[in-house]
Every structure is written in structure tokens, then in C-alpha cells.
Image: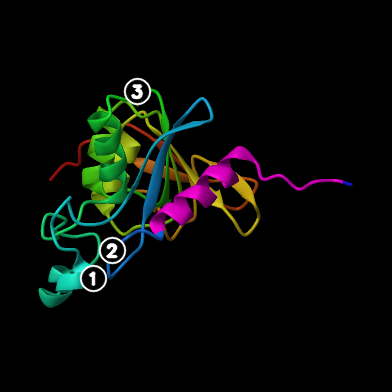
């Protein structure tokens, strides 16, 4: 009898989805975990700092102020899942340099800056997030970003769908065999006015 074991990426992403169930955000439940050598180092979900009221208790400040997703991240009671995972590792003295982070959503620009500076080598995510600056940081940095495609149960390395990750000036989108877009950086030429 054959046992259907999930591959490592699916396994860790499933755990990230379970972690997201602890989220106290009204808009979006996000979970993250940091993994190195197939060992979980830290987890995090989006919610308010310790001993502060959660959005599920106070209501959503961003909803009241009509702030769109992917904008003005500082106007929120909560920390993001990726931030909490990084903070938990630091709090407990666990090095995350060279680790991978699994997140249910593509990290925002603030989280991406923290991920890059923490020395995390690879970001794996399931769902997109509308933050153009995050995409720019991904393209500019050497960080590897991988979308986990659960519909096909495969991982698409450095590949995302057109609608989630368009090419910006200075990049070209190259169609790969699996009909997803692979983005490559090219040097920008200055435009004459």
C-alpha cells in the first residue's frame, strides 16, 4: 500500500496555514514559519503585540480609515506574520541566517526588508499580496522567491503568475514551459527627456 506523503514544501505550507488560524486580523489571516534544514525554528501570525487589544476586539483601524490593502502598513494595531516569526526567533536567540520562510501570503515591503536583513535565503508563499514596493525589493535583491502552487501540488521556482508579478521597466517577462512568467533583471538605460 502506497502512502501519500506531502513533499517538504507542501508540508511546511500546510503548517503555515494552520498557524494563520491564530490570526486576529479582520481582513486577512496570515501565517508564517521559518525553517532551516527541514527544522521549524519559529512561527508567527498577524496580530497585535503582547498585552495589547486585538483588532477582533477593537475593530479594524484600517477599515475605519478606508486604507487599501498593501498601503500605509504603519496604520495598523497588528504585526505581520513574518515580523512575528522573525521577532520570536530573536526573542529566543535562534539564528535564522540562511533559513527559508514559508508564508501564506507574499510578504509586504516592510516584511521583505526585514527578511532580507535577517539573512533569510528563500521566501515561499501561497497567495499574492498587492504591494508593488515588495516586488521591487524582490527583483533588486538576491533573495529567492517561490510560489507554491497547490492546485497542481507543485512548487514554481522563481515563478509567479502574470497578474501577481508584472515586469517593471528594466525587467523582461519570459514565458516558461509551464506558462507562468519568469522575471529577469536587466540594466536600466536612462531615458532622454
Principal SS element in the magenta part? helix
Q: Which mark identifies residue 24?
A: 2
The residue tagged with tag 2: helix, strand or loop? Answer: loop
Q: Which mark identifies residue 97?
A: 3
**Residue 167 horizontal side relative to residue 153, left or right:** left
**Residue 15 horizontal side relative to residue 121, left or right:** right
Q: Residue furthest right?
A: 1
Residue nearest the viewer, comparing 162 with 85: 85
The residue tagged with tag 3: helix, strand or loop? Answer: loop
Q: Residue at x 47, y 55 (%)?
A: 18
Q: Which mark identifies residue 56?
A: 1
**Mark 1 or mark 2: whose residue is earlier in sequence:** 2
Q: Is residue 109 visible?
A: yes
The residue tagged with tag 1: helix, strand or loop? Answer: helix
- How many residues crowd mark 3 within 10 Å: few (<14), some (14–19), many (20+)? some
- How many residues crowd mark 2 within 10 Å: few (<14), some (14–19), many (20+)? many
Question: Percent x, y for residue 68?
Answer: 21, 68
- How many residues crowd mark 1 within 10 Å: few (<14), some (14–19), many (20+)? some
Whether pointer 1 and pointer 2 mark residues with C-beta atoms closer than 8 Å, the reply is yes
**Numbered range of the magenta stretch:** 2-20
* 110 over 54 or under it: above or below: above
Give how far apart the Cα atoms at labels 1 and 2 are. 6 Å
Give how far apart the Cα atoms at labels 3 and 1 are. 34 Å
Residue 89 forms part of the magenta stretch? no
Q: Quadrant of residue 112?
A: top left
Q: Is residue 169 visible?
A: no
Amino acid at each position: 500500500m502506497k502512502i501519500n506523503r506531502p513533499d517538504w514544501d507542501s508540508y511546511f505550507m500546510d503548517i503555515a496555514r494552520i498557524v494563520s488560524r491564530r490570526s486576529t486580523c479582520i481582513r486577512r489571516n496570515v501565517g508564517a514559519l521559518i525553517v532551516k534544514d527541514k527544522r521549524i525554528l519559529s512561527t508567527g501570525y498577524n496580530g497585535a503585540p503582547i498585552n495589547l487589544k486585538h483588532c477582533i476586539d477593537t475593530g479594524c483601524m484600517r477599515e475605519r480609515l478606508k486604507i487599501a490593502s498593501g498601503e500605509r502598513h504603519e496604520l495598523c494595531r497588528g504585526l505581520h506574520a513574518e515580523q512575528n516569526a522573525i521577532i520570536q526567533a530573536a526573542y529566543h536567540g535562534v539564528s535564522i541566517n540562511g533559513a527559508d520562510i514559508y508564508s501564506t501570503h507574499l510578504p509586504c515591503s516592510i516584511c521583505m526588508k526585514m527578511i532580507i536583513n535577517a539573512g533569510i535565503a528563500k521566501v515561499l508563499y501561497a497567495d499574492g499580496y498587492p504591494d508593488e514596493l515588495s516586488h521591487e525589493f524582490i527583483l533588486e535583491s538576491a533573495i529567492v522567491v517561490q510560489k507554491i502552487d497547490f492546485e497542481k501540488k507543485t512548487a514554481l521556482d522563481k515563478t509567479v503568475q502574470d497578474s501577481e508579478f508584472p515586469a517593471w521597466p528594466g525587467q523582461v517577462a519570459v514565458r516558461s514551459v509551464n506558462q507562468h512568467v519568469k522575471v529577469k533583471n536587466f540594466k536600466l538605460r536612462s531615458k532622454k527627456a
